[in-house]
Image (cartoon, rainbow, N blue to C red):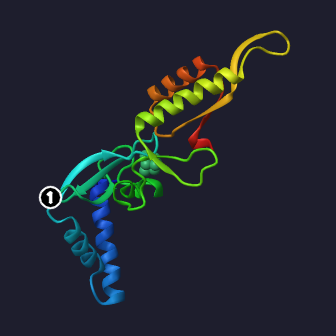
Amino acid sequence: MREVHLPQVSRRDFLKIGAATAGGTGLSALGFDLAEATQVKLGLRIAGATQAHSICPYCAVGCSILTYTDTKGKLLQIEGDPDSPVNEGRLCPKGASAMQLATSARRVDSVQHRAPGATEWKTITWNEALDKIAQNIKDSRDRTFVQQDANGNTVNRTEGIAFAGGAAFSSEEGYFTTKVMRSLGLVHLEQQARV
Ligand code: SF4
């Protein structure tokens, strides 16, 4: 039997073919070339834009994204990088909304503190926030530290503090933060991806 060699089609080519096929469907159903109209629209949006490579900030999968910025550095669009072996052009819904991290008018970009009993949030500096966190950790640890359990076993632990890690942690960050928290005597460690 004669061997048939199919042409090698990259993912990028496949997406282009898919878009062209969809365009054909659009042409017969709507009377104009839908794919071409979409390309014109996208072309206008990112025409002349600078493309850069980046990584989705949300989780440790580390999907690659392409970003497009205008001449003033304004972010115009993000999309999955089709050349990435990790995500091959795809982004999950969370990653696809990553553009809002930079562009959303509702994004809070300063540290907010609401004192106990207060009804209003107040803007504070990072130094103030870090000092406060450090002081609270020390106070809670001093107050709740247990050297021995009810049976006289040495435990050296505090159950007055819990720690939740972020899914964007790399292995090294996860290892480091776990070491720091265990050295403080924490036993309640959780991971944001599981809650
Ligand atoms: S949040 Fe979604 S898009 Fe972002 S790295 Fe994780 S899987 Fe990828």
Residue occupying image coordinates x 28% and y 64%: 16
- Image quadrant assignment for residue 179: top right
Side (left or right) of 3 relative to 91: left
Depth order, front residue of 28/172: 172
- Residue 107 lies, in percent from the top left, at 41, 56
Is 69 rendered above or below residue 124?
Answer: below
What residue does disc 1 label? 71
Density class for disc 1 (Cα within 10 Å; few <14, some 14-19, many ≥20) is: few
Residue occupying image coordinates x 32% and y 73%: 21
Is 152 rendered above or below residue 128?
Answer: above
Depth order, front residue of 27/52: 52
Depth order, front residue of 146/111: 111
Side (left or right) of 30 relative to 42: right
Can see residue 4? no
**Quadrant containing the C terminus in the rendered view:** top right
- Residue 192 lies, in percent from the top left, at 57, 41
- Residue 190 lies, in percent from the top left, at 62, 35
Q: What residue type is disc 1 on?
A: Thr
